[in-house]
Structures are given as structure tokens and as C-alpha cells.
Amino acid sequence: MNINKQIMIVGFGKVGREVVHQIKELKLPVVFTGLVDSSACLLSHSLSDTQIESVLRLKKTGSSLADLAESKPLSFMTDYYNKDTIILDTSAARNLDWSLALQKGCQLVFANKNALSAPWEQASVLYHKPGIRYESTVGAGLPVIASLRSQVTSGDQITHIEGVMSGTLGYLCSQLEDGVSYSQAIKQAFEVGYTEPDPRDDLSGFDVLRKALILARTAGWSLEESGFSVEPLYDERLVGMPVSEFFNLTSLLDETYAQRVEEAAQQGRVLRYLATITPQGGKIGLQAVERTSQLGALQGPGNYFAIYSQRYNQIPLVIAGPGAGIEVTANGVLNDIIALLS
Amino acid sequence: MNINKQIMIVGFGKVGREVVHQIKELKLPVVFTGLVDSSACLLSHSLSDTQIESVLRLKKTGSSLADLAESKPLSFMTDYYNKDTIILDTSAARNLDWSLALQKGCQLVFANKNALSAPWEQASVLYHKPGIRYESTVGAGLPVIASLRSQVTSGDQITHIEGVMSGTLGYLCSQLEDGVSYSQAIKQAFEVGYTEPDPRDDLSGFDVLRKALILARTAGWSLEESGFSVEPLYDERLVGMPVSEFFNLTSLLDETYAQRVEEAAQQGRVLRYLATITPQGGKIGLQAVERTSQLGALQGPGNYFAIYSQRYNQIPLVIAGPGAGIEVTANGVLNDIIALLS
């Protein structure tokens, strides 16, 4: 363990706060040099526990760092970039530019999918580098990225990847299977906190697409979004209105999905929102899979990843488990930090 | 990567030879300083490709290192122990003593389960050390040990582990489920090379016990063999005779197992040879599990590990896939070496 590592955290949502908590609890040999949100940053060669606690409290109330007297404009953040710095991006920010951080030798840990799923021309610099890790972008804390990286590093040739990568849509599929209507299932998923504030952000399949893109690129395939076909789980009649109105219209699709569930059931199958990724591109959408298969046995919000390769050609390497949740997502970040420290 | 690492390989069965092959293919920055079998060793500050090739050829023909003019008695091996040495134990030897190697600062990679499953008093020195790895002892190349170690290192508290850890017995369960008789299923497993030369070595459950012990200890529980109850898949009528005679007697149990399969089927269940491990001890034996569960969906020689913990309490972290095979087992060893090099 290197005892001089410095941590900067960008983003103070629930995951960011839980990461700080887990780092403190484990007593990792690091100092915090920067706490950053979209408004400002708090910087020091070693932020005190009191400073960190006060920022955590502040952020929990919804305030921003700019409200702190001691905070600095974001442009000062780069002063603290150096080769002993690990930057954690747990934000949801788009268009953050990490090129200076990389030039200065910083290591990076992403929970934020945006930079990694940007067009390959920008994103390529973030892949296949030991100092850049992003376990929690796919499957939360499940060791999917670590395993895939190990396979690639040890000379295995990945042939294709199959996965159920959305806890939200997994829950939806399970509910539909249990006879709950499409509109009711979405309402329930929203109420238990499984969906984004606008459920269409999940139903669009876009989040799955970004995860699939990250997996593909980790496997060594420099795909773009355009290389995937994506089936959204709503249609044009549910586009363009506010969320409250959307909820009133979801019953328009109740019959469509009930019918698809029924058709699958008649063949002993169940629907899963599946991503299939090959070196040439990917396909994301509902698929009817055997009820008695591993995929069919998947229940509720569980994620499932099957990696097929030269070495795992008959039976794939499967990693499954919860693909969402604050604690496990933060744990994915923590494991990345520990890997960089050792 | 440290370019001065020195590799000593103990054991030249199929796995050991495949490891050498994969190291060469990946061009890992290492030199080979020792090739060791049970008869003698070949040592040098840097063994040439020609020397290595000739040993591989020799071992493939069933000869031993003592037949080589340039080989030395085993006692010379320790001369090459130093802090830049990684020793790979891919042998099946019992009672190898690694204390001097550890004193001299060697790192160790085990494919051999014996030292790790010895009584805790001897084995404890091998656990919870970053420089000692043993991925391929459980689940071949599947990242079970790496994941479990990450969980423990990052402060997660493992509560219990459930697993199907024998490809051989998994195959047997699948065959029984398909209506094949016990005696036929064992004969087939033997013929396709899934069993040990004496199938009772698999049927005894002892190999599963050793894997369960290694998992338990990795989870932080210093259990002993005596902490497990093990149900062997044969009875006293099949004990004590040579293998050929054993095969003639297996049909004595055809009805017993057909009946158990039938009883399970009547409840929508299938039999799996399951190990359940808790901090207090473990249970290994046939269990009837729901046909439509993840465990029920498992087919043939596939392995399955479900880790339940403080963080993975509702849905476990599952790792599944082939738990045997020369190439994937060697790959587990290779991943351990790469982890030690980086």
C-alpha cells in the first residue's frame, strides 16, 4: 500500500457520500485533497475530518459547495492534479475533460458512465490503462469489469457477451411475468425507487446501451452507440409529455406487453431485457428465453453477465447479482481504489 | 510490471505444462529459474527455452526430471528462493513445506489444494497474504477467490456461501435428472474423462470438502475438515475393492438414486451436490432445489458459487461457469501470476 495517495472526489450524490464513508470506515491510507461538485471545490493538501463531515452534511441538505466560504472556483481543482492523485468521478456530469488529469499522471476511478461511453475518439484514452478503473459503471459492485479485464490481460479472446444489465427493467420483466400490467409495473417500480425520476430514462434502453458500450470497449471492441440496435420499452405515443402525464398514458401499452408475455409463456419462455454484444455490434431489447435457463431463473432487479470467449466457449463465465444499490455501487468504487493502492 | 520476477514451477502435469505455454504465449516479463517434479529439479538463473522445451517433452512422455543429466536433487531447490521468486505449485503433492520459501520472501501461487486445506495450524500462514494466491484451487479459472478476497478486503462481512463445486458430480446430477441410471452415469463420466482414475475420489465429496474449506478460510473462518458434514455418493458396499470391481457393483445403488431423483421431481425439484458454508461449519451433500431456480438451471459440469454478505444480503453475488478443464485452470494460475507482477 502506498500511504501517500491523495483522493479527489467529484460528485456528492448518495454514491459519493457512501464512498467517503466506506474509505473512512476501512481506514484506507489516503488523504482527501479535493471535494468537488458542479458549483465549486474545496481543496487542501489534507482536508480534515471536520471539513469532510461538514461538506457531507451540506450536500445531504441539497446545498452546493459554492455556499461554503472556503470553497474555490472549479478552475483551481487542477492545481491539485499530480501522480499521487486518484480522482473519483461519482457525478452524473457530462463533458468533463480528463485529459489534463491524465497528462499530470492522475489515476481515475469512474462511477460516472458518461466519459467512458462518449464517442470512441474521445473515450479511447480511458480504456486499457491499469491506472483507470470503472467497476461500478456496469453491474454496480459485481466484479464484471475486473473479470473481463483479467480475461483480456491474460490473453483470452472474448467472442461475445450477453447480459441483463438493468435492475429496473429486470424488475419490470418479473412483474409482467407475474401478471402485473405494464402500467402498474412501471408505477410500482417508480414508487419503490427503482426508476429514474422520469421512468422513460430507463425504458429507453439508453442506460443499458451505455453499459453495453463500456463492456464492448473493455473486451477490446471499439464500438460506437450507432453499432447497437436498441428496442425501447415504450412507443411514440408516450414521448414528449411531462412525467405525470406519461403515467396516465402507460396503460395504452398494457395489452401489447401482456400479449408478448403470453406468447412467450406458450413456448415455456419468459421475457428478459437482454443485451447481446459481439465484436461487430450489439442488440438490446426484449427476448423470450427458456424459463428453465439461467437467464429465465433470474428474478427481479438482479443483473446477469455471461462472457463467452476462446477459453469459455461451451459454458460461459457468468457473474450475477444485484446491479444497483448505493452500498454495492460504492463498494465497486472502493475496490477500484484498493486495486490502485496495492 | 516488475521485469525481474523469477518463476519456479513445482509439478508438471497437464496444468503445469499449460501454464508454461500460456506464460510464453503472453510473453510475460519473467525468467524461469526452476522446474521441479517429485524426483528432482532443474535450476538455473535463467533456464533457456530449449531447456524448458526439453523438460516439457520429457514430462509428457511420463519420464521424470531425475532422468536428466543436468538435474539436481530436490534439496538444491531452496538455493533459488528469494524475494523475486514466484513459486507455482501445480503438483498434487502432499506435505510440501513452504515455510522456508515464505521466510525468504517468495510469493506463492497454488493450483494444489493440499497445503491450503491442511489443518489450520499449518495452513493459516498461507491465508490473507497479498503475496499468496490460489484462484485455480476453487472453480478453476472462475474469479471466485479474487472476488471473495476483494469483498473481505473492502470491509464486507461474508455471512454464508453456497456452491456447486464439482463438475464431475454436477455432470452426474444432470445425467440422473435425464433418467440415466447411477451406474451408467458414473461409467459415462469416467469414459469422458470427468472423473479421477478411481471415481470414488470424486463421489466421496472429499474434493468438494477441500474447496469448501479453502473458501471458508478465505472468507475469514478458520474452519477444519471436522467442521463439515459430508454425504458421499456411494455407500459401504462399494468400499474397499479395486476400481474394476467397483464398476461391477455400482448398479446396487441405481434404485436408491433413481428414487431420490423421482421424489425431488414430484416437488418440482432437482438434485444438486451442494456445499453450504457458514462461519460455524458446513454441509456438503445432495439437495433438492427448485427446478426453476438459478441452481436448478445449472447444467452438466458447470460450477456455481453464491456469496451472501452484509452487502449482498438479498440477492447474492453469483459466479458460475466451468469449474474444471486444463486451459481455464491454467488461466487461473496465470491471472494470479499477473496480479503478483503488477
Image (spheres, coloured by chain):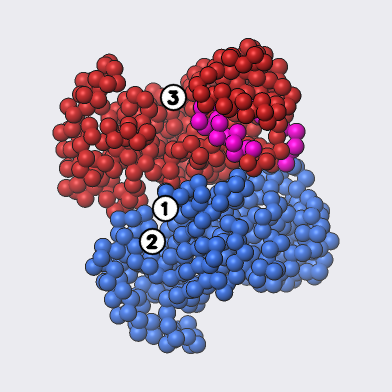
Chain colours: A blue, B red
Kindly indicate whether the residue at mark 1 contacts the one at mark 2 (C-beta within 8 angstroms): yes
**B235 displayed left or right of A199:** left
Instruction: Report whether residue B32 is seen.
Output: no
| Residue on which the image places disc 1 | B315
Q: Is residue A202 above or below residue A253?
A: above
Place of residue B117 in the rendered image (x, y in percent of width and height, measured from the top left): 48, 25
- Both marks 3 and 2 on one chain: no
Residue at x-position 63% and y-position 51%: A336
Name the element at disc 2. Answer: loop
The answer to whether residue B314 is seen in the rendering is yes
Labels 1 and 3: the sequence-earlier one: 3
For the N terminus of chain B, give its image quadrant. Answer: top right
> Which residue is outermost to the right?
A79
Question: Residue at point 59% right, 67% down?
Answer: A223
Question: In whole angstroms, how far apart are the C-alphas of marks 1 and 3?
Answer: 28 Å
Q: Is residue A330 magenta?
A: no
Chain ID of residue with mark 2: A
Q: Give the residue type at disc 2.
A: Gly
Q: Which residue is mark 2?
A: A300
Q: Is residue A7 above or below residue B162?
A: below
- The CA span between labels 3 and 2 is 37 Å
Q: Is residue B309 left or right of residue B266?
A: right
Query: For the residue marked with disc 1, what is the amino acid?
Result: Ile
Answer yes or no: are tags 1 and 3 on the same subunit: yes
Q: Identify which residue, B88 or A83, lies in the foreground.
A: B88
- Magenta stretch: give its range: B1-24
Residue toward you, A42 or A189: A189
Image spot of residue A194 (x, y percent)? 45, 67
What residue is shown at x 27% (from left), y 32% (from top)? B187
* Disc 2 with disc 1 on a shared chain: no
For badge 3, the amino acid type reads Glu
Could you tell me which residue is drawn at 20 percent across and 43 percent down? B179
